[in-house]
Amino acid sequence: MARQSQPTGLIGQSAVFLDMLARIAKIANVAATVLISGETGSGKELAARAIHYQGKRADKPFIPINCGALPDHLIENELFGHGKGAYTDARDTQAGLIAQAEGGTLFLDEVDALSPKAQVSLLRFLQDGQYRPLGGSRLLSADVRILAASNGNLHERVKQERFRADLLFRLNVMELVVPPLRDRGDDAVLLAQHFINEAACRYNMTHLELHPDTVPWLMRQIWPGNVRELQNRIQREFLMCDGPDILISDPAPVTERRQKADRRRAARDVHPNTLNFNDAKQATLQAFERNHLIRLMCETAGNVSHAARLAGKERRSLGKLLKKYRIEPEGFRGT
């Protein structure tokens, strides 16, 4: 039977998932700062909410902020607020998210997107619980638990001098790793059934069942966009379904069937006698292009313009490559 953590919506019964739930229960009982890591779409915010609502701060606010969605010059204002006259349009004093989260939890998603100046300000707050609003003349104190999440490897960013080492140490007092969906066994089936129920309620439509042939299909997929990708796919299939059950038999939009061997291996593992040199070269190039495109989509949550900038390509050119490999950016985006 599926285990679900209320009210956060965490659903699953695989061993790695249950291990994560057990760790969440332990982390929730202490007030330490937590760094949550995991791939895009794996459920890091759900894990953060579980930590909050299973802890002693459950009756206090849970305030999430996506640091990557705000321009550098607005992050500090959002976190710490501002005083009247702090800048041209600051006609009134405004409390920041830290003040709004008083007694509760502040969840910093994509914390690696913080500007160097914002990193320093956050570090100071973590050290003594004090902060100064923009344009303010005095220090304020707040009792707030900080949970932070990052899609990327913060240790690598420290080596690249893109993230402060002392801030990483402050954030990583306790660590929680959210496993990718491909490592969670038949949790994909449980989640699919949940998303069907969710869609039926949301759109006030008749409940549908999963066709028996869809179950092994779900199990074969790699799901690079994780739970978010699965949710989008099931919702789309639900809305387009004409029969009493949902039958999916075509390859997932962003990947082929999972291979029994290491699915990250390139075409170099193909037996040399099966391909001539030119064929082998072409297969290797195609494998590289496909894998790199999937990585770009994961890193940018399906933002094609951002992915094109990272790849150093024109957006139209990247779009053609995505179509060539049947990679749908929507599968990496939130709903």
Image (cartoon, rainbow, N blue to C red):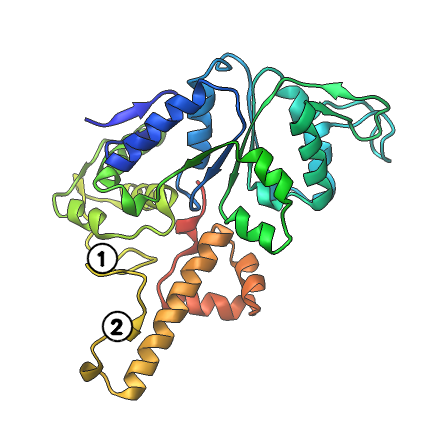
Disc 1 residue crowd, few under 14, some 14–19, many 20+, Cα 10 Å: few
Find the distance from the CA under tag 1 to the CA under tag 2: 25 Å
Q: Is residue 188 above or below residue 104?
A: below
Q: Is residue 110 visible?
A: yes
- The answer to whether 22 appears left or right of 174 in the picture is left
Quadrant the C terminus occupies: top left
> What residue sits 63% from the left and 52% below the top?
162
Taking depth in this image into account, of 10 and 141 the one nearest to the observer is: 141
**Which residue shows up at 47% across the image and 59% down it?**
296
- Helix, strand or loop for disc 2: helix
Q: Amino acid at mark 1?
A: Asp
In this rendering, position of residue 24 left or right of residue 191: right
Q: 164 left or right of 246?
A: right
Looking at the image, is mark 1 or mark 2 earlier in the sequence? Answer: 1
Q: Where residue 79 appears, x then y in whole percent? A: 68, 30
Say if 133 sits above or below 258 in the image.
Answer: above
Mark 1, residue position: 250
Of residues 333 and 145, the one nearer the viewer is 145
* Amino acid marked by disc 2: Asp
Residue 185 at x, y = what percent? Answer: 22, 42
Provide the residue designation for mark 2. 269
Q: Nearer the viewer, residue 219 or 327?
A: 219
Which of label 1 and label 2 is nearer to you?
2
Can you say whether 298 is above or below 141 in the image?
below
Q: Residue furthest left?
A: 212
Image-quadrant location for residue 242: top left
Residue drawn 29% across the image and 47% down it:
182
Is residue 78 at least partly visible in the picture? no
Label 2 Cα neighbours within 10 Å, binned few <14 / some 14-19 / many ≥20: few
Residue 157 location (% of width, % of height): 58, 51
Taking the image as shown, residue 1 lies to the left or right of residue 310, namely left
